[in-house]
Amino acid sequence: MPEGPSVRKFQLLTSRFVGQVVVKVGGSSKKINVNDLNALRLQDSQVHGKNLFLAFVAASSPLGPSVEETVLQKEAVTGPSSLVEGRGEQDCALLAHPQEEELQDLQNSRPGAQSAAGGSGSWLRFHFGLFGSIRANEFSRASRANKRGDWKDPAPRLVLYFESGGFLAFYNCRMHWCSSPVADPTSDILSAEFNRGQALDALRTSRPICYTLLDQRYFSGLGNIIKNEVLYLVKIHPLTQGSLLAQSDLEHLLDCAIQFTSDWLQSKLQGKGLHLQIYQKERCPLGHVVMKGALGPPGGWKRLTWWCPQCQPAVLSGDGDLTLGTE
């Protein structure tokens, strides 16, 4: 699924339409009534981790300034060290338990929900699945035939047509209405407010390092591609317990994760591709055979992980085992 840098690029695409009124809607979504968006004004666009939030108000409502849009567009010019803001792999309120997240979605599943600031606006939350994307003023076209041999274009979940004549098409995403995109920017790896101390505390526990890097409570926006690439760059085995690593190694890992994520964002904004060294590779850059396995915490998601046993040697615990740590 799209990681933090991709979703930030989506946000910049949507920010061009802030202030405009939706004059027509389309799409295949069954989660929301897309017709509820007709005749509403797009008031704001924000990104938090892997989630995009769009605020809509009645067309007659005054349009307030979009602080996040202004900051992001300004920082896109100034460089990778500051083009950041937000959080959120989970839901609008970033609750700790999935059951509470579902309840929050149900409570805010109507477009009339009020924002936390007391206004009349409503926020539509987007979480993108595999190959999820946003297109501005164009539709996605089939790049290959499907299993039946048909060249069928992907169907957008939502299409918003604006008064200017432009449109936005949203693909493979989940949408929910929520009252406000409450988030903690200190956990967003692309945020200027990212809390290094909090991240280092999470990394130095006895959990395998590859589990911690995907924990959105501490590394919001960091996904599986970043995890794999960064661990190879710093030559750390994915199942190494953080508590077995020196403080300098943890600092280096964190620096590399921040830099890689920022560089990827800049590459996307410049229309450049990402040069991968280990993710989905059969051999590492040095020619060694790469291992692949589905790794994840007990009872949690298992994510495909690639590593080079020679470049990323296992770090053994005191009893001589490569243990999985504790949860």
Image: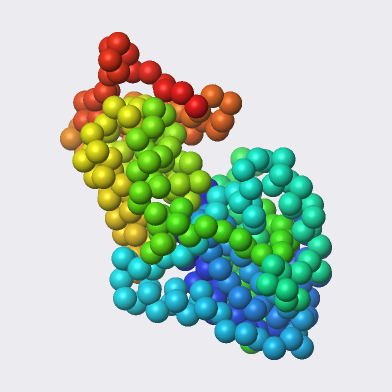
Image coords of residue 32 (percent x, y)? 78, 59
* Between 181 and 140, the one nearer to me in the picture: 181
Would you say 237 lies left or right of 29 here? left
Would you say 58 lies left or right of 276 here? right
* Between 90 and 217, the one nearer to me in the picture: 217
Q: Which residue is drawn at 36% across and 55% down?
A: 261
* Between 219 and 171, the one nearer to me in the picture: 219
Residue farthest along the left direction in this orientation: 286
Image coords of residue 24 (percent x, y)? 75, 77
Image coords of residue 323 (percent x, y)? 38, 18
Q: Which residue is drawn at 44% across and 73% down?
A: 72
- Evaluate whether residue 271 shows in this view: no
Would you say 292 lies left or right of 92 here? left
Would you say 175 lies left or right of 220 here? right
Q: Residue at x 74, y 52 (%)?
A: 105
Q: Relative to 308, say whether 227 is above or below.
A: below
Q: Relative to 273, say whether 13 is above or below.
A: below
Quarter occupied by residue 111: bottom right
- Evaluate whether residue 286 shows in this view: yes
Q: Relative to 302, say whether 126 is above or below.
A: below
Q: Which residue is drawn at 34% across and 77% down?
A: 77
How did the renderer colour the structure? Answer: rainbow
Quarter occupied by residue 279: top left
Residue farthest along the top direction in this orientation: 319
Image coords of residue 100 (percent x, y)? 71, 44
